[in-house]
Amino acid sequence: KNEVEQSPQNLTAQEGEFITINCSYSVGISALHWLQQHPGGGIVSLFMLSSGKKKHGRLIATINIQEKHSSLHITASHPRDSAVYICAVSATDSNYQLIWGAGTKLIIKP
Amino acid sequence: EAEVAQSPRYKITEKSQAVAFWCDPISGHATLYWYRQILGQGPELLVQFQDESVVDDSQLPKDRFSAERLKGVDSTLKIQPAELGDSAMYLCASSRGRARNEQYFGPGTRLTVT
């Protein structure tokens, strides 16, 4: 079992739809990160969470420490949101190095 | 807004040649990371620096890869000799510290070995 699991692996939606990507982890963490990677591109950090909820523009990230679960939401999705979204955790037992989820490939159709 | 700088953005080299990548982290960031990302896979940590010291290089293929951060600021990752399997995106990231600090990623260097 992977230490960080994301679902779904692939998601295709229509422009304007509300998007949810989930992340579950099984290790002790100091923080959880959501990152975005466009095809062939570098990685952009979207959020770092250790508790509660954060919002940036149309993106919202939540974390439930007790349930070891986080969600990334995109409101009013747009084709430019098409990318791979990656959940990664800073694991306390691994010198805070990032343990990466497999990523969720999101395609937003116009 | 401060960014992590990397160069070159793209590099094509022949196998058995030497290649070097450069990274300049965000000013004041003590921790610097080099990752390798093979197409379709997640990033793999190659080496982590805390200031000028290597904290972890357990995944660095030391027979051909080397990394340095002499003054605790910018860093160089070298491959000599390059092999076909080294074709990947090489990402540099930096953070203020290790524990709760967000990692900021550079744009990456895409290496193609022919």
Image (cartoon, coloured by chain):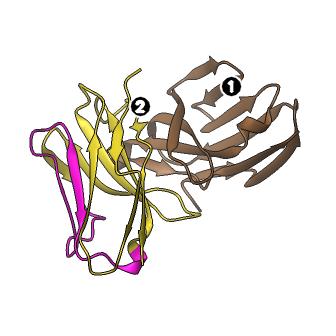
How far apart are the two marked residues, 1 and 2, measured between alpha carbons?
A: 17 Å
Question: Which of B71 and B102 lies nearest the eye of the viewer?
Answer: B71
For mark 1, does the 10 Å Cα neighbourhood hold few (<14), some (14 to 19), or many (20 or more) residues? some
x 72%, y 36%: residue: A81
Position of residue B15 measured from the top left corner of the image (x, y, whole percent): 33, 80
Of A108 and A27, nearer the camera is A108
| Residue A25 screen position, x and y as percent | 57, 46
Let me know if residue A71 is in the magenta part.
Answer: no
SS at circle 2: loop
Q: Colour of chain B?
A: yellow
- Residue that numbered label 1 is attached to: A59
A62 lies above or below B49: above
- The magenta span reads B58-85
Three-letter residue code for mark 1: Leu
Which quarter of the picture shows residue B90? bottom left
Looking at the image, how many numbered discs can be counted on the residues? 2
Main SS of residues in magenta: loop
- For the N terminus of chain B, give its image quadrant: top left
Determine crowd level at label 2: few under 14, some 14-19, many 20+ residues with C-alpha closer than 10 A. Answer: many
Residue depicted at 27% across the width and 71% down the height: B61
**Residue A96 visible somewhere in the drawing:** no
Q: Are marks 1 and 2 in contact (CB under 8 Å)?
A: no
Query: Looking at the image, which residue is at 73% across and 36% down?
Result: A80
Give SS at disc 1. Answer: strand
What's the mark number on residue B102?
2
Q: Inspect the image, locate mark 2, and give the three-letter code of the amino acid beneath it.
A: Glu
